[in-house]
Image: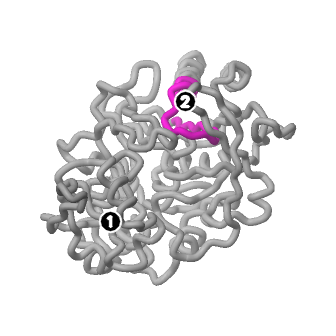
Amino acid sequence: MQAELDRILADAVASGAVAHAAAIVTDGAAVRYQGQAGPRALGDPRPLQADTIYWIHSMTKPLAAAGVMQLVEEGRICLDDDCGGLLPALRSPKVLEGFDAAGQPKLRPAKGRITLRRLLTHTAGFVYDMWNAEQRDWLKQSGIRRGDYYDRIENCPPLGADPGQRWEYGVSIDWAGKVLEAVTGQTLCAYLDANVLGPLGMASTGFVLTPDLKARLAGVHQRDAAGRIAAVAFDPPIDQPAASFTGGGGMFGSPADYARFMRMILNDGALDGVRVLKPETVQAMAANQIGDIPVTGLPTAMPAMTFAFDFFPGIEKRWGLSYMINQTDIPGMRRAGSLAWAGLRNTYFWIDRTSGVAGAFFTQMLPFADPETLAVYEAFERAVYAARQRA
């Protein structure tokens, strides 16, 4: 498997499909593959290393959800509690129903409660401006930035639908992180460091980009409309205000660290003798939590940031407590019931608890859901399962 996966990564870089790439595979016992190819950034003579750091964006979500579910285990909050009881901004949400002839937003009171379960499953009604043009236009008109949502009640963005009515990917797990802070009295960063990252030995993962992590950081890239890839300037902050820590994104980390988290999930919540989650909690997180509501593809409202995407079109998908779940086997790839998601700069992972294997793929480029990158990721996953079948 090592030689075949190394070849896939090297060929992807040599062909220009990606600027660089890294990948890792683990089972419940140990890492079975780790490799990388290409430079830290185009024009940088330094190659990627095994300990290179990547901005994992929405791959933060499962880490934050693990922390939230610890609170559920402890009885400090229940999945069907109304989160408006903890966060005033969520008590009386509004639904955006387009704009009137004068260009003013048409808002009405939402029907239904914003519960923790709905936040963790993206059925609370919150959306992302990158995939929802009305939310994009509301943000432009209001002048409110995403980082300002949590400071004042009036900054809470409108919903795209009533809570519990449909699935749409959005900022719901950002709010779940704020629920955790309200319950614990700690910042999300401090809580996850003490209760998830620390116990798992994920010393190279976090919201705060320390000088050590910054020195190992991969460069970022942009693919233009003609398909050309170029390195772009990127100077992430080292010092961040506590309000900037949200459950939906913002973490940096290494492939080896993320493999430790995935291995914990494969092992029903424990790793190296340390229990982070109860087995029944992992089972609940891995189960369909949205009933018959489908997980659908999303159009792009910001082409420079993201392509339109629908992972595995034609395959029925549902959502667990922070994960996408394919409902049927993907031939030659992951089994039904696998958990998966991704990060904005084209980082991806899957956890196949039935087969006992998990993998993650890392590059740093916009737009998200880049077709060439997804083709490399699929080739990588297929090669993992083919190698396991031969073994």
- Amino acid at dot 1: Pro
- Amino acid at dot 2: Ala
Q: Which is nearer the eye, 279 or 223? A: 223
Question: What residue lies at 23% left-to-right and 62% top-to-bottom?
Answer: 104
Q: Position of residue 221 (x, y in %)?
A: 66, 40
Q: Is residue 224 above or below residue 64?
A: above
Question: What residue lies at 56% left-to-right and 42% top-to-bottom?
Answer: 28
Q: Position of residue 108 (x, y in %)?
A: 15, 65
Q: Is residue 45 left or right of residue 255?
A: right
Q: Which is nearer the eye, 327 or 84? A: 84
**Of callouts 2 and 1, which one flags the residue occurring earlier in the amino acid sequence?**
1
- Residue lying at the far top of the rendered structure: 390
The magenta region covers 357-377
Question: Could you tell me which quadrant the C terminus lies in?
Answer: top right
Q: Is residue 125 magenta?
A: no
- Residue lying at the far right of the rendered structure: 45
Question: What residue lies at 55% left-to-right and 76% top-to-bottom?
Answer: 242
- Residue lying at the far bottom of the rendered structure: 185
Q: Is residue 185 left or right of residue 126?
A: right
Question: What residue lies at 53% left-to-right and 23% top-to-bottom?
Answer: 375
Q: Residues within 10 Å of mark 2 (few under 14, many from 20)?
A: few
**Numbered tag placed on residue 157 in the rendering:** 1
Tell me the colour scheme of the image. Answer: one colour
Q: Is residue 282 above or below residue 11?
A: below
Q: Is residue 45 left or right of residue 323?
A: right
Q: Position of residue 350 (x, y in %)?
A: 49, 38
Q: Is residue 367 magenta?
A: yes
Q: Which residue is mark 2?
A: 225
